[in-house]
Image (cartoon, rainbow, N blue to C red):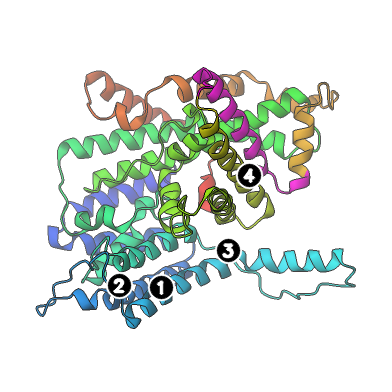
Amino acid sequence: MVFSSHLFVFWFLPFVLGLYYVVPVRRRTLLLTLLSYLFYGWANPLFVILMFGSTVVDYFCGLVIAAPATDPDGTLNPLPRDGPRNRKQRLALLVSIVTNLSLLGFFKYFNFFSDSINEIAQMMGAAGPLFERTLNVTLPLGISFYTFQSMSYSIDCYRGDAKAIRKFVDFSCYVSLFPQLVAGPIIRFQEVADQIVTRTHTLEKFARGIAFFSIGMMKKIWLANPCGNMADLVFDAEQVTTLDAWTGVLAYAFQIYFDFSAYTDMAIGLGLMIGFVFPKNFDSPYHAATITEFWRRWHISLSTWLREYLYIPLGGNRRGHTRTYINLALVMLIGGLWHGAAWTFVIWGGIHGLFLALERFLIPRFPRITLPRIVGVGYTFFITCLAWIFFRSDTATAAMGLIRTLFTPGANGNASLITAQLHTPYFMISLLAAVGFTWFAPQTWDWTRRMGPVKVAVVIFALFSSVAFMTIQAFNPFIYFIF
């Protein structure tokens, strides 16, 4: 069930809000949990069992970790940050991490690694498949998000950054909360711990939630979807001209940005409607003047998670320059693999890791060389677009072929069919609108802080026009649902 669908907009969302504001306050967390499980299980009820199992393990691991800091009356307290941890606490943390990574590894990477082993074996001269795969594993929706989120709870409790939660239903609500369940943002437990127990509901917050949801819907329907159609025409074609290749690459850069930022806007808006305030997840990433700055602005919840739970534990920048460069590259390679079980995602992560390390090496050594910011923005957007080619392509060979076309003027000049399909007024206007929104429009986060009559009119137009246009669009996926 996607947010930009009639089922969600006209049935599920009104049903949720109606029940939520009718039931007593003390029952709302339980209601949200049950409705979130309904939302998640809509595509495949078996996925619910998997998420429930992960939730149970991390809940009890949290209680074991918190046991030494529990008062006689049962009150849970955060552990001292610098205090020792006993054997049971270390074992509970290990069980939580191993369980979540095992679930993620099996369901997301079983097919990938078995196929990779067979490919390597064939390259070395094996007569047939080395690994006979009789099991085809289906990837559960959102498993990359909720396993990271649930695992961060145990780690935060162990570190003393958060206190464990006593009520199972409260923890279940944190893990399963439907607005951000299947595509983020990745919410750390300490960011919403107090809100799960007690949250405020105001008309102002609800109105801002509607504004967030409406603007997100408009970005999805009016910008991401047509850009996605353009990108598919190019990336799925056998041959394209140089101009068409550049058009398709730009379209994909805008598709993935507006698709994911739209989902985030809608998730934040839905959260506000039920009293939750989620953290900001995008901060105009294509305004960044370096790759380092890009990762402070793009998918902030993921980059924060990788920094807090991977980069810093690996040593961060505390063990010398060489180790810092290795840590940056390693984190981005893992970040690439987290996005998808394919070597193209690893290459995408490797490109970003390489440039993060290069910037870390070069910028401190040439502090007096300052380029105009527009040059930095252009460099960053260029590198990001080239990396997106690997992210979108089915194979590394296809990605390299498209890159060669980009830098071969006049390549495939006879590929006129794609050109005719691509360069229509609708697609070109959509692409120009994406450019305008990217670099000249205010962020939803800032624009919705204060609502006046004009903004209310814009919100109403955005919502109703998007819903109307949604009825005639056949192309309406959310990219990050597959990660």
- Marks 3 and 4 in Cβ contact (< 8 Å): no
Question: What are the residue bounds of the magenta stretch?
Answer: 368-397
Which of the two labelled residues, at mark 2 and mark 1, occupies the earlier sequence position?
Answer: 2
Q: Residue at x 72, y 26 (%)?
A: 244
- Marks 2 and 1 in Cβ contact (< 8 Å): yes
Measured Cα–Cα span from mark 4 to mark 2: 36 Å
Element carrying mark 3: helix
State the residue position of label 2.
62
Element carrying mark 4: helix
State whether residue 411 appears in this view: yes
What percent of the width, then of the height, locates residue 444?
Answer: 35, 30
Element carrying mark 1: helix
Around disc 3, counting alpha carbons within 10 Å, would you say few (fewer than 14), some (14 to 19), or many (20 or more)? many
Measured Cα–Cα span from mark 3 to mark 2: 25 Å
Which of the two labelled residues, at mark 1 and mark 3, occupies the earlier sequence position?
Answer: 1
Q: Residue at x 40, y 34 (%)?
A: 283
- Marks 3 and 2 in Cβ contact (< 8 Å): no
State the residue position of label 3.
108
Which of the two labelled residues, at mark 3 and mark 2, occupies the earlier sequence position?
Answer: 2
Measured Cα–Cα span from mark 4 to mark 1: 30 Å
Marks 3 and 2: which is nearer the front? 2
Around disc 2, counting alpha carbons within 10 Å, would you say few (fewer than 14), some (14 to 19), or many (20 or more)? many
State whether residue 225 appears in this view: no
What percent of the width, then of the height, locates residue 39?
Answer: 39, 58
Residue 376 painted magenta: yes
What percent of the width, then of the height, locates residue 11?
Answer: 35, 49
The kind of residue tagged 3 is Lys
State the residue position of label 1.
96
Left or right for 360, reference 12: right
Residue 391 circle label: 4
The kind of residue tagged 2 is Gly
